[in-house]
Image (tube, rainbow, N blue to C red):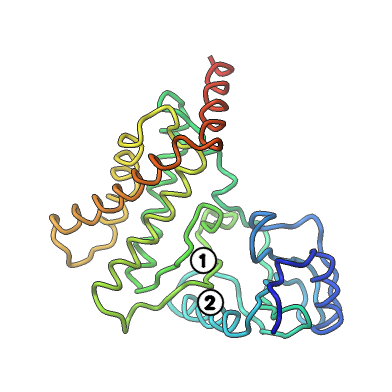
Amino acid sequence: MKVRPAEHTPEAVVNDIRHNVGHFVPDPHIQLGDTDSAHRLHMGMLEPYGQVAIKPFGREIKALHEKSMLQAVRERGFETFDPLAVASGSLGVYLITAYRPGLRHLGQVDWNVDIASPQLSRVIIPTLHTVGNFLAGLHRAEVTHGDFQVRNAVYDRLGKPVVVDLEKGQIQTNHSRDHRRKSKDADIQLFGQSVLDRGLLLDRSANYRARFLGEEFVTPAQEASSGTDSSEELERRKSEIQAKWMAGLRRDHGTPWMKQQLKDAAQKRRHSN
């Protein structure tokens, strides 16, 4: 049984690709995603494909699933990585996709802004609306992402969304209506949670932060989805998402990590005054 590629150093993974897949020259200046990601992408030149992005997996079935999801999403008219092949090595299985230059992700945005910051209205709120509209479009196509966090919200040089990291993605066409709703709401809830985890409105209460995201993110996403749910049903679903955010915020409030975040936010406000 192959072990998880993330358990190996990047150098070991690169050598495995060279020995078992093809001659690979990594580009150390290109990275998309967090350095501690479980599936860190390796960018570079791979014979005979050219410039590629390579994603390691521990199991072939997961690599094949993401490859099929990328193909399905492209067929539905969304921009994504062009899947080229799935190849096996000694340490793992590798999904090889064509490299796309000039991408950025929303993990690069400074979400740690307070209620008085000009960035809230200039950057944060428009970004939330844009993401909500994109997610609604994905859901209208009956696609759910499964791991839609800020680092997986990716855009090209023109600001057009690029769908990435579909290891947990699903095509919802054959699922029940209840399953589709829950999966779509899970995408919305996870993205909002990742925004809160990065410090959005740390100077406000858990209730305020959850309601803010409800109005500026959930509502636009729901309005753009053009589904068949009644306004009462949409409000109920929004309330459930907000309740999950508030529960997480209250649970984390007393942790050392959150205390440090609050301390850093207070220091940031002092320096900006």
For residue 5, above or below residue 267 = below
For residue 36, above or below residue 125 = below
Tell which of 210 and 121 is nearer to you: 210
Q: Position of residue 52 (x, y in %)?
A: 72, 72
Q: Position of residue 182 (x, y in %)?
A: 30, 66
Tell which of 51 and 268 is nearer to you: 268
Q: Which quarter shows the N terminus?
A: bottom right
Q: Is residue 268 left or right of residue 99?
A: left
How packed mark 1 is, by other alpha carbons closer than 10 Å (few <14, some 14-19, many 20 or more), is: many
Name which quarter of the figure residue 108 lies in: top right
Q: Which mark is residue 70?
A: 2
Q: Amino acid at mark 2?
A: Leu
Which tag, 2 or 1, sits closer to the chain's start? 2
Q: Position of residue 202 (x, y in %)?
A: 45, 31
- Residue to which mark 1 is pinned: 163
Q: Amino acid at mark 1?
A: Val
Q: Which mark is residue 53?
A: none
Tell which of 273 and 256 is nearer to you: 256
Q: Is residue 146 left or right of residue 67?
A: left
Query: Does dot 2 land on a helix, a strand or a loop?
Result: helix
| Point 60% across, 80% down: residue | 63
Answer yes or no: do the residues labelled 2 and 1 have beta carbons within 8 Å? Answer: yes
Alpha carbon distance from label 2 to label 1: 8 Å
How packed mark 2 is, by other alpha carbons closer than 10 Å (few <14, some 14-19, many 20 or more), is: many
Tell which of 137 and 117 is nearer to you: 117
